[in-house]
Image: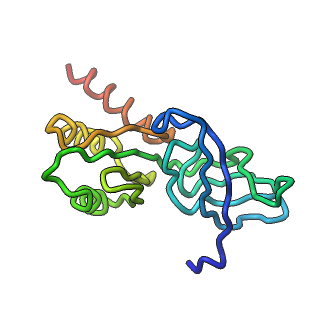
Amino acid sequence: MDKSELVKIKTEYYSDVLEERTIETLWAKIHDLRKGLYQIDNIPFYGAPFACKDIIHAIVDEDGVLCFQKVIRASNHSILQIFVHQKNTLNSEIRDWFKDVNCSTEGVSENYFVVDVPMKIDYKKLQDSLKRKETEGIVEFAEALLSKKHKKDLKTSIFRKFLKS
């Protein structure tokens, strides 16, 4: 997509990563300009209350800046925050692994990036793999925003284990 078709949306929220209120601007596609609706087109870095592909409402503030107001329709995407702390593991290797499982990533720093987990992903399987990598000391991860669908993946998995026992 051509950047000229995108707008910047400003959002302000408390970030658990930064442990302070933060302002972040994200790219969005115009969904319905008349109604002030936009579709988020990149991955929030620090814990915004929405995910990639969500439809949000934004208004222009007194300085002429588009500002996030609320989520109108969730995309059922989830956002993960990944901290790579094993010295022998390259950030790019872990990011390539996410790409191989059909998730997109955006780098924030040498050892920190965020992941967009699309709705079609079986989140329980992804989480199990991440927990193994965490146990091995390769990464640490946080679930910045879990969609209803991915929460259901986790609950369904727990229920299946209960039925099998």
Residue 26 shown left or right of residue 83 in the figure? right
**Residue at the image position 56 percent from the left and 78 percent from the top:** 1
88 and 161: which is toward the camera: 88
Q: Quadrant of the C terminus?
A: top left
Image x and y of residue 9, in percent: 68, 58
Residue 92 shown left or right of residue 108 in the figure? left
Picture quadrant where residue 25 is located: bottom right
131 and 158: which is toward the camera: 131
**Residue at the image position 50 percent from the left and 45 percent from the top:** 46
Picture quadrant where residue 159 is located: top left
**Residue at the image position 56 percent from the left and 63 percent from the top:** 41
Residue 133 versus residue 35 in the image, above or below = above
Picture quadrant where residue 132 is located: top left
**Residue at the image position 24 percent from the left and 58 percent from the top:** 97
Residue 92 versus residue 80 in the image, above or below = below
87 and 150: which is toward the camera: 87
Scheme of colours in the image: rainbow
Residue 60 shown left or right of residue 127 in the figure? right
Residue 30 shown left or right of residue 48 in the figure? right
Image x and y of residue 61, in percent: 83, 53
Q: What is the number of callouts on the image?
A: 0
Image x and y of residue 53, in percent: 56, 58
30 and 87: which is toward the camera: 87
Image x and y of residue 135, in percent: 17, 34
Residue 151 versus residue 37 in the image, above or below = above
Residue 149 versus residue 116 in the image, above or below = above
